[in-house]
Image (cartoon, helix red, strand yellow):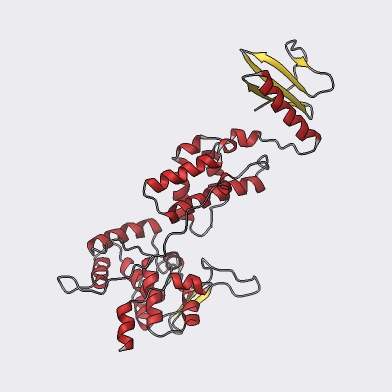
Amino acid sequence: MSLRPRRRSDASLLVNEGQMATFRKRSGNWQAIVQRDGRYLSRTFDTKADAEEWAGEIERDIRRGQFIDRRATEKTTLSEALDLYAEAILPGKKGEYRERRRIEAWKRDPLAKRTLASIRGAEVAAWRDNRATDGASANTIRRDLTILSHLFTVARKEWKGFEGLMNPVEAIRQPSPGKARDRRLDHRPDKNGKDEETRLMEACKASNNPYLAPMVTLALETAMRQGELLALRWEHVDLGRQVAHLPKTKNDHTRRDRTEGRDVPLSSVAVKTLKDLPRSIDGRVFPVSLCRLNIHWRKAVAAASATGLRFHDLRHEATSRLVERGLGIEEVRSITGHRTLAMLTRYTHLRAEDIARKLG
């Protein structure tokens, strides 16, 4: 759609008295022009009937006070909108690194070349199905769709000229949540008599990154998330009280008049691990970037033959161990930071053989 000043000298305009719309034939096509606030909205169609239908709809919306100017949504591509979204929304957001990677992946998709107004639910549904066919998990697809949906929502509510934008993600079915992971460290010994945890710790200690092994140990002892460990600062660690304070956490839903975050108790192993660490200049306990950490983690997992193990699985392992040690559910929840029992249950996977030994 284009906006241009009125050209009163144009003799080819076909004007109907009492109407705002005018029409003219150009190179075999018909252009409809609708006046609004002294300026003109125009669009070109194959037939005059289509031009008149469009102009009639615009005029009715103007008379009813329901007209929405969609020029911005018809000119802005998804790729351009993703850049605006990344600049305005992502800075300081939890999970910023991962969301930026998802945005870059979206920008490589053919849909990124389309304008926002032209993207329909059917096309997003086709993208969803193609991603599933390519082997992407349901949870991965849901997270990618969440980024896209939030972009459309933010644009409609906060960006000037995008008020009439429709969210195509709201029109499609979301993939069902994937089955909760139950991956735990395998305690069965290999041919060399070493279980998976022993092999993993040996590989982490042999890593070029000196912080990898201590991070893995802290993850298993405290059930902290990867992001919480990377954000941990020495000023929030009290080795005397054996407590690490996390000022802001993923599930921080406290009111402003309450203390934010949570306190995580530190076992004797965790305290010793922290005492052995050097103090970094920037105050972080683990002065490592997420990207570098993941590189060294993947190398250690491969060296330990720990097929399919993710860093987040250490939180599953740690949570399950807390329950196995006899801590009550509320005690475990206060340590891990899970908001509900249902959420905690997804992260707790007790081994049947361990329970059998307790039964005698």
**Residue at 66% from the left image edge and 17% from the top image edge:** 30
Residue 279 seen in render:
no
Q: Quadrant of the C terminus?
A: bottom left
Residue 197 seen in render:
yes
Above or below for 7 versus 327: above
Residue 258 quadrant: bottom right
Residue at the farthest bottom position: 360
**Residue at 36% from the left image edge and 76% from the top image edge:** 350
Q: Where is residue 319 in the image (x, y as percent from the top left)?
A: 41, 75
Q: Where is residue 308 in the image (x, y as percent from the top left)?
A: 30, 61
Q: Quadrant of the N terminus?
A: top right
Left or right placement of residue 255 versus residue 244 in this view: right
| Number of numbered discs visible in the structure rendering | 0
Left or right placement of residue 333 versus residue 168 in this view: left
Above or below for 138 versus 214: above
**Residue at 53% from the left image edge and 73% from the top image edge:** 340
Residue at the farthest left position: 191
